[in-house]
Structures are given as structure tokens and as C-alpha cells.
Amino acid sequence: MIKVLMIEDDLELAQIITDYLKSFDIEVTNIDSPYTGLSMISVNKDFELLILDLTLPEIDGLELIPKIREKSDIPIIISSARDDILDKVMGLERGADDYLPKPYNPRELQARIKTILKRMDSNSSKSKDDNTPISIFEVRENDMQIYFKGEALTLTLAEYDILKLLIQRNHGVVAREDFIYASDNIEDDSSLKNIDVIISRIRTKLSRIDDSKTYIKSVRGIGYQLI
């Protein structure tokens, strides 16, 4: 049975959703206090997904999301009567996976839960089966930190931006110019040679953890890629 945590202070709505999802083998635990819900996420690792209202007592749901992300990468579906585009954008940017405006048919919620969890399972299986550079890097954007094989890298802001872009491109080649355009921490008039120097520093830092191979490949006349 899929275990879902819901933070919703409308208890009548919460009961309707709980009863409906139960027929799809989804067990919902509802909490009407956001801070209690946050504590449960930290303590109980059995929850596979969170359904989060925004208009809550004690703290707004948009403010709660970053606190959740400090503790867990649990998938989050925002369930809210607030349909302002700014709320949607802020929710997704702060770490939510989906936004479902109320009122909605519970059948749609069920479908979104299954879709998100299926995607998560697929990504997890790929990570376990595929020992690629992407799977051994972890980007924590809230902390502006990148981990390599479980160890935190000490990076300058420019090094962080460059390595993050390489990871995001997922084995794709990144042109030297793209590094400059994508980073606020590299001057627009920087020479392309400066990019080579920064890449060299990143390679050195990676080699201190694993010197068995070069993880960043030079692509002649273009730029770089993770291999």
C-alpha cells in the first residue's frame, strides 16, 4: 500500500480524499498542523509522497516547502484553492513537484500521485543500475552544494555554476560560451581561456576523491562534457 502524508486543515475535505484514495490502495495520514507534519516527515521515512495545502495555520505552505526540502526529497503535490500564477510558480520553484488547484476531482489527484511515484521509481532504478557520472553527483541547490560520491566539494561560485550545468546537461556537450551565459558569477567579457582554467580546478578537486579517471572530457573546438 502506498503511504501518503497530507497537510490539510480542511478536515472534511481531507476525509473525502482519504476515503477515496483508500480504494486505490493509497493510505493517507492527514495532519492539520504544518509543524507536526514537518516533524513526521523527519521521523517517519515510510511516507512516499506529500499532499500540501498552502493556506495553513501557523505557517504558509509556500514557506513550509523549503523547510521540508532541508529534511527530505519526498515528492510534493500542492493542493490549494489559491490559483494565482505566482503561487504556482513559487511553489514549483521552491521544490514542489506538482500543483493541483481546488476544486478538483479526486480521480485526478490519484492519477497524479501514481504518475509521480512511477517516475520516481524509474529514476531510482536507473540510478541503481547505471553507475554514470550523473548518478554519483548530487546537487543541493538550496545550499549551493555539490556532492561527488557522497563527499561535499569545496567550490567557488563559478565552479559550482559550471559543474551544475554539466550535470544538468546529462552527458551533453556544453560550449564554453554557454558557461559564461548561464552563470552570474562569470563576467560576460571573460575569455574562453578562463573557462578552461575553472574546469581544470574542478578536475583537480574531483581527482582528490577519485583519481581513477577524468570525469570531465574536453570536446575539441566546442567545450566540455561529463563522461
Image (tube, helix red, strand yellow):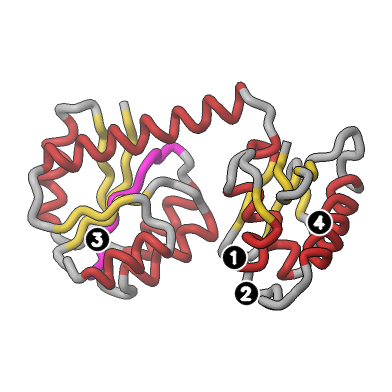
Q: In the image, what residue type sits under mark 4?
A: Ile
Say above or below: 126 vs 84. Answer: above
Q: Nearer the viewer, mark 3 or mark 1?
A: 1
Which of the 4 image quarters holds residue 106? Answer: top left
Q: Which residue is mark 2?
A: 184
- Residue at horizontal 39%, vertical 71%? 63
Furthest residue toward front: 221
Q: Residues within 10 Å of mark 2 (few under 14, many from 20)?
A: few
Q: Residues within 10 Å of mark 3 (few under 14, many from 20)?
A: many
- Report which residue position mark 1 lands on: 182
For the point 28% across and 38% down, the residue is 113
Regarding residue 216, the answer to whether it shows in the image is: no
Q: Residue 199: which disc?
A: 4
Say which amino acid is labelled 1.
Answer: Ala
Q: From where the camera sits, is residue 16 visible?
A: yes
Residues marked 4 and 1 touching at CB (< 8 Å): no
